Amino acid sequence: MEMNQYLEVFIEESREHLQSCNENILALEKKPDDLSIVNEIFRSAHTLKGMSATMGYEDIAHLTHVMENVLDAIRNEKITVTPELFDVVFLSIDALESMVESIAAGGDGKRDIQEIALKLQMIEDGKAISQSDASAEAAAAVAEPLEANKPKTQYDQFEQTVIKQSKDQGFECVEITVSLRPDCLLKAARVFMVFEVLEKCGEVIKSNPSVEKLEEEQFDQHFTVTLITKESASDLHSKIMKVSEVDEVEISAFTFDKSTDEVKEDVKIPEGPAGSTEKKQPAAESTQQNSGKQAAGNKTIRVSIDRLDSLMNLFEELVIDRGRLEQISRELDHSELHETVERMSRISGDLQNIILNMRMVPVETVFNRFPRMVRQLARDLNKVINLEIIGAETELDRTVIDEIGDPLVHLLRNAMDHGIETPDIRKAKGKPEEGTILLKAFHSGNHVFIEIEDDGAGISRDKVLEKAISRGIVSEQTAHTLTDKQVYELIFASGFSTAETISDISGRGVGLDVVKSTIESLGGSITIDSTEGSGSIFSIQLPLTLSIISVMLVELAMEKYAIPLSSIIETAIIRKSEIMNAHNQKVIDFRGRVVPIVQLKEVFEVPGEEDESEFMSLVIVRKGDKMAALVVDSFIGQQEVVLKSLGNYLTNVFAISGATILGDGQVALILDCNALIK
C-alpha cells in the first residue's frame, strides 16, 4: 500500500493528538484524581500508536506504547501521579513532537528513545525515578552520533534547560559569530539590523557581549549570538550577509557534555510544588466539548493554506474590478447596468465575508503552547504561577496569527520574570503565594484585543524614569511632566531594561521594542496600564484582517491617498483663522484638546499651488492617546481596498504602509498614521 498519500493527514492528526495530550496532562496535574482526563490522554496516545504503526514509524509506536502502559497503570490506580512523573511524560511528548516534525520536514522520524522509555518503564514498575540510574542505563545504550561542537559561550542552568527542551522539540541551537568590517562606523546600527534578521528566523536566547554592551558599542568587530531556530545554516548565513558592512559570518551547532545534562536534571527533577496550573473548564465539560469536536470533525475537510491564499489573491483582483465597474456604472448612469452592478457588489460582499471567515483561525492555536511554557518556566524560576486563558475561541486572520506568537511569548516571559514575585516575597506582601497571569482575547468592532494581566510587582515609575534619564531617553525637566502612561511607554525604547541583572528569559533589552515594532507592523498598537505593587496589564489591539481594509480616500492636488478608517476619529472642515501656534507648531483646539496639524503636502512633497480658500479640510487621526490633524485638499469618500505591498525596492518609505489600485486604474498610497504621529 502506498503510504505517501496519507502522510499529510498523519502529520496533521498526530499534531492534534499531541496537542490534546499536552492540554489534558496540564489539566490532570491540577486534578490528579480525575480519571476521565486520563482516559482522554489514553485515547489520544492509543490512536497515535495505531496510526504510527500503520505508517511504519516504529520509534513513535514504541514510545507511545510504553507511555500507554504508564497511563493504563494510572487509570487502574496502580501508581500515583507526581510532579516527577509529569516531567517524564512531558519529555515523552516532546520526543514524539520532534519525531513528527522530523517526518513533516522530510526525515525518517527516528530518534534514540531508550532513555525516556527506560524512565517510563521504571515508573510503570513503581520504582523511584533516580536520574543517575536512568542516565547510566541510557549511557550504556548506543547513543546517536552528534554532529555538533562544544559551546563557545558559558550558559547558566536555565539557558541549558531552554536549549535542551528546544532540541527535544526539533529546533536547532546554533552559535552565530558575526564579524563587522574594520571600517564600520555605525556598529550598534549593524548589530540591531542583524538582531532584526535573527528575530525573524527564531529565538535569540543570549548574546556575547551582552545586549547593553553591543548597543553602547563596547566590543571590537566580533559578537556572538545564540539562536534557537529551524532554519538551515546556509539560509541564516545568506540572510545575515545581506546586512551592510558584515564581513564574515560563522555558524556552528553545539551540544553539552553528558555530565552537564546530568547535573542539570538532578537539580530540576526533585523540585517541590513550584509549577503552574491552568484554569480552563471542569473535566466533564472538557470531555463533552472534545466529543462535540469529534462529532463536528466529520463535517469538515482539510484545505491547504496555499489554496486559501490563491483564493484570496483572486478575490482581491475581483475587488479591484468591482470598484472599476461601480465607477463605470456611475459615469454611464445606465439604470439596468446600475442595478446589475449593485447586485454584483452585494454578492461579492457576501463572498468576501465568507472568504475572510475561511481564513480566520482561533487564537487558541497560539495560546495552546503557553500553559506548557508557563509551567516549565515557573519551575525553573521557583515561582508558583497560575495561567488563566479567556476567549481562546476568538478568531483572527491567519496572517496576523502567524506573526503574533513571538510578541506574546516575550510578554508572558516578561510577566513571569519581572512581574510575578517569588512565593516568599508575595507572602511578605500579604499576597497569595500563587501568582496569576490572565491571558484574555476578545472582539471589539473591527479589532481583536489581547490582554496579558499579572498580579505581580507592577512597574516602578521612579525606576523607569531613573533608567530613562541615565540612558538619555528623556531629560530631567521632561521626566517630571510625563504622565504615568507616558512613563510606562518608555520601556519600549530599544535596549531599555530596569532589571539589575540581565535575564535572557524575558528578552528585556531586545524584547519589548521588537514586540512593539512587530505589533505596529501588523497595523496594531500596544498600551500598558500598571499599579505598582498590584500588577500590570499589557493590551494589544490588532486588526481582524490585513488584506482588505476600509479606508477614507482623500485628494492632495492631483494625487490620491488612502487613510485607514481604524485610525480616523472624524473629519472636519475649519476656518484657517482657527489655527493657533504653540511651540513653533501649528495646532487646533479639537474638543478641548490641543491637536498638532500635519501638512501632508509638505510631508510627501506634493507639487501644486497653495489653496487660497479660507476653509481647510482635516482628517483627525489617533495613535493611542496621541492625535494629529492631517490637512487634505478634499475628501473623496469611504471605500474597501486591497492592501498591496510596495515591493522590495521601496521597503523604507516614510509614512506609507502600502498601495492600492482604484476603480479608475489609479494607484493610491495608503498612509501609515502611526509613523506620522511619531
Image: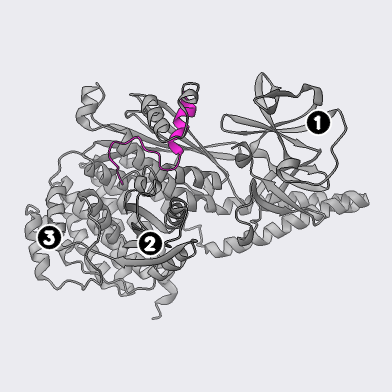
Task: Tell which circle, 2 or 1, labels the residue nearer the N-terminal end.
Answer: 2
**The label number, if any, that marks residue 616 in the structure image:** 1
Image position, residue 162 (x, y; %): 27, 53
For label 1, count other residues whose C-alpha is less than 10 Å away and answer few (under 14), some (14-19) or many (20+).
some
Q: Which residue is mark 3?
A: 259
Task: Tell which circle, 3 or 2, labels the residue nearer the N-terminal end.
Answer: 2
Q: Which residue is mark 2?
A: 178
Q: Nearer the viewer, mark 3 or mark 2?
A: 2
Q: Nearer the viewer, mark 2 or mark 1?
A: 2
Image position, residue 656 (x, y; %): 65, 48
Check contact, mark 1 vs mark 3: CB within 8 A: no
Residue type marked 1: Met
Image position, residue 7 (x, y; %): 41, 71
Query: Looking at the image, which residue sits at the far top?
Result: 592
Q: Secondary structure at mark 3?
A: helix
Asked whether the viewer can see residue 483, the reply is no
**The label number, if any, that marks residue 628 in the structure image:** none
Above or below residue 92? Residue 414 is above
Residue at x-position 82% and y-position 38%: 634
For label 3, count other residues whose C-alpha is less than 10 Å away and answer few (under 14), some (14-19) or many (20+).
few
Q: Is residue 315 left or right of residue 128?
A: right
Residue 552 occupies which quadrant of the picture? top right
